[in-house]
Image (cartoon, grey):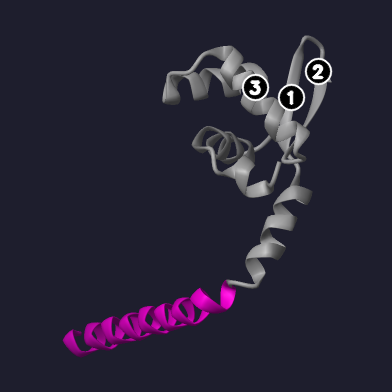
Amino acid sequence: MHAFDVLGDPVRRRILELLAEGEQSAGTIGAQIQGEFTISQPAVSQHLKVLRENGFTSVRPDGQRRLYAVNGAALRDVDEWLDGFRRFWAPRLDALATEIARGKRQRRSQGRQHD
């Protein structure tokens, strides 16, 4: 399965967002996802399986629990693919940063004028 097919599903993206906060048990992930997406526990397990089999997560046993974590290798592949497109938005982000800095300078100088 192509990385963007995996990431194209909002449930799998949300699971990765949760795991970006740190390692979590399958039960914790399941409870959160079931509440947000109103899907069954077996459906959540299937999404976890897709993420694991496609290299986006790793899993390790911890007693009766299975702990999931983000596997950065698959995300690095996506990042490398996106690298060819950064030129389309990087100048705009640079311009935005310049405008933000200009606004901060203006507010500081206006604040000093009123003192």
Position above or below: 112 against 78? below
The 10 Å Cα crowd at callout 1, few under 14, some 14 to 19, many 20 or more, is some
Residue 114 falls in image quadrant: bottom left
For this orientation, the residue located farthest to the top is 64
Q: Quadrant of residue 78?
A: bottom right
Mark in the foreground, 1 or 3? 3
Cα distance in 3D space between marks 3 and 2: 20 Å
Q: Amino acid at mark 3?
A: Gln
The residue that mark 3 highlights is 46
For the residues bearing labels 1 and 2, Cβ distance under 8 angstroms: yes
- The numbered dot on residue 62 is 2
Ranked by sequence position, the earlier of labels 1 and 3 is: 3
Give the numbered dot on residue 76: none
Secondary structure under badge 3?
A: helix
As drawn, which residue projects farthest toward the left? 114
Q: Position of residue 65 (x, y in %)?
A: 74, 14
Mark 3 vs mark 2: in front = 3
